[in-house]
Amino acid sequence: MQLTPPLGIFGGTFDPIHNGHIYPVLEGAEKANIKKVALMPCYIPSHKNPAAASSEDRLKMVELVCADHGLFYADPRDISRGIPTFSVDSLTEIRKAMPNTPLCFFIGTDSLQSLFTWHQWPTLFDLCHFVVCERNAESIKTLNSNTDNSLKRHGPQLQELLKKRQVFNPMALHSRLAGHIYVANTQSLTVSSSKIRQQLANNQSVDSFLPPKIIDYIQQHKLYQTRADFC
């Protein structure tokens, strides 16, 4: 079977999408020679811990980022589906549509460390590779010494998983449809969407966290405000 170039996939709430989402994935994709990455905002039902911004606004902000970075394109399938779904559902759908394309699912080390709690996590390795964005793999190196109880519990299991599936040559992602873990040495941007939302609500500057187009969109649509004088 002749494989086509791999497709990157990066999902999240993106509430809002920020530089901590954008730049590690740009760097990780460059290191892995991945030329396209689908940005996939997740659907959040209004009755369950809703996102602060609507699905439509979150998707629009993702589209604005895609317009500035040719690597990215917006994939609205989770939002369009209109029901809560798991990563395995979207990956299964993409795999059926792209049977000859390696799929590379971008995650951070926090997601890697919680992988064993994901719905049907073993099935994911039949569907995709994982590209882990991490500065010098420091979190992975200290798995067993971490003080977090859940991480200490899963640390040995994750070490075994890495021993079985980790590859160090990113071109291995191009020669097989799924099953590998590649840890990309990327910049670490310590910023969270919740912190950004809080600063926006307090009318504090977020210029170092968000692209200018996203700031403009948030201001124009009065997102994340808590006061009538928000501007």
Image: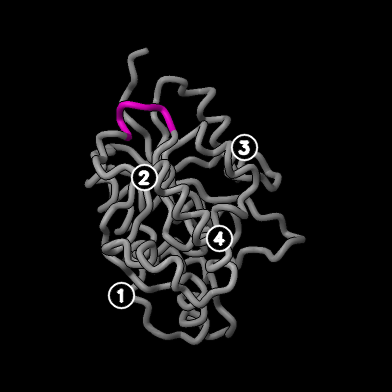
Q: Secondary structure at mark 2?
A: strand
Between disc 4 and disc 2, whose residue precedes? 4
Does 120 sit above or below residue 55?
A: above
- Identify the amino acid type marked 4: His
Magenta stretch in the rendered image: 173-178
How busy is the neighbourhood of tag 3: few (under 14 within 10 Å), some, or many (20 plus)? some
Q: Whole-Å distance between the Cαs marked 3 and 2?
A: 24 Å
Residue at (51% x, 32% y) in the render = 127
Q: Secondary structure at mark 3?
A: helix
Name the front one of labels 3 and 1.
Answer: 3
Q: Are marks 2 and 1 in contact (CB under 8 Å)?
A: no
Residue 66 lies within the magenta run: no
Outermost residue toward the top in this view: 1
Give the x, y percent position of residue 176. Answer: 36, 27
> Mark 3 = which residue?
89
- Identify the amino acid type marked 1: Ser
Between disc 3 and disc 2, whose residue precedes? 3
> Mark 4 = which residue?
154
Numbered mark located on residue 106 in the image: none
Residue at (39% x, 39% y) in the render = 180
Between 13 and 187, which is closer to the camera in this rendering? Answer: 187
How busy is the neighbourhood of tag 1: few (under 14 within 10 Å), some, or many (20 plus)? few
Give the x, y percent position of residue 188. Answer: 31, 67
Q: Whole-Å distance between the Cαs marked 3 and 1?
A: 35 Å
Q: Whole-Å distance between the Cαs marked 4 and 2?
A: 17 Å
Between disc 2 and disc 1, whose residue precedes? 2
> Mark 1 = which residue?
208
How busy is the neighbourhood of tag 2: few (under 14 within 10 Å), some, or many (20 plus)? some
Between disc 3 and disc 1, whose residue precedes? 3
Between 5 and 196, which is closer to the camera in this rendering? Answer: 5
Between disc 4 and disc 3, whose residue precedes? 3
